[in-house]
Image (cartoon, rainbow, N blue to C red):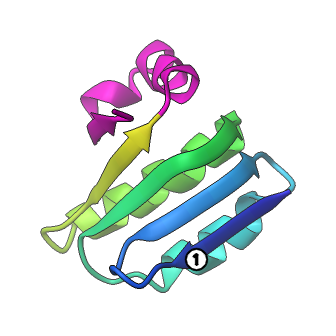
Amino acid sequence: MFHIELDEAGRIVAEGRLDAAQAPHAQEFLDAITEECILDLGKLEYISSAGLGVLLRTHKRLMGGGGGLKLVNVNSHISDIFMYSGFDKLFEIELAG
C-alpha cells in the first residue's frame, strides 16, 4: 500500500511502500508540485529504485526553478538506502528524531 498527500502544514506526506507499482502514482502527484517543498517520509516503510527515480526526477525538475525537495523524518532503513545509493549527497535530509 502507498499513499501520498499534502497535509495541513503544506508538507507532502508519503506512507507505505514506494515501489515500481506505485511509482507512476507518486510521479503524477509530485509533477503537480511547482516549487521547493518538504517531503515527510516518516511513514514510508520501503523505497525501491523506481521510487528513488521518482524523487530524483522531481528534485532535478524543481532545482531547475531554484527549488528542490527536502526530505524529513527519514527513518534509519530509508536513510541507509539513500546512503548506499549516494542520494544522501543530492538531497537535504533530516533524520527522524
Q: Give the answer, above or below, for where 62 lies relative to 41.
A: below
Q: Give the answer, above or below, for where 30 lies relative to 73.
A: below
Residue on which the image places disc 1: 5
Q: Position of residue 12 (x, y in %)?
A: 46, 70
Residue at coordinates 33% horizontally, 27% vertically from top-left?
88
Q: Where is residue 69 in the image (x, y as percent from the top left)?
A: 31, 58
Instruction: Give the magenta part as a residue range.
Output: 75-97
Marks counted in the figure total: 1
- The image quarter containing residue 83 is top left
Towards the viewer: 37 or 54: 37
Q: Position of residue 52 (x, y in %)?
A: 57, 42
Quarter of the image with the C terminus in it: top left
Q: Give the answer, above or below, for where 75 lies relative to 55.
A: above
Binning the other alpha carbons within 10 Å of mark 1 as few (below 14), some (14 to 19) or many (20 upward) gives some
Magenta run includes residue 78: yes
Residue at coordinates 77% horizontally, 59% vertically from top-left?
2
Residue at coordinates 28% horizontally, 38% vertically from top-left?
94
Quarter of the image with the N terminus in it: bottom right
Residue at coordinates 70% horizontally, 36% vertically from top-left?
46
Which type of secondary structure does the marked residue at label 1 adopt? strand
Q: Horizontal placement of 32 versus 18: left or right?
A: left
Question: Which residue is most to the front?
Answer: 97
Amino acid at pointer 1: Glu
Magenta run includes residue 39: no
Towards the viewer: 45 or 30: 45
Q: Horizontal placement of 37 versus 43: left or right?
A: left
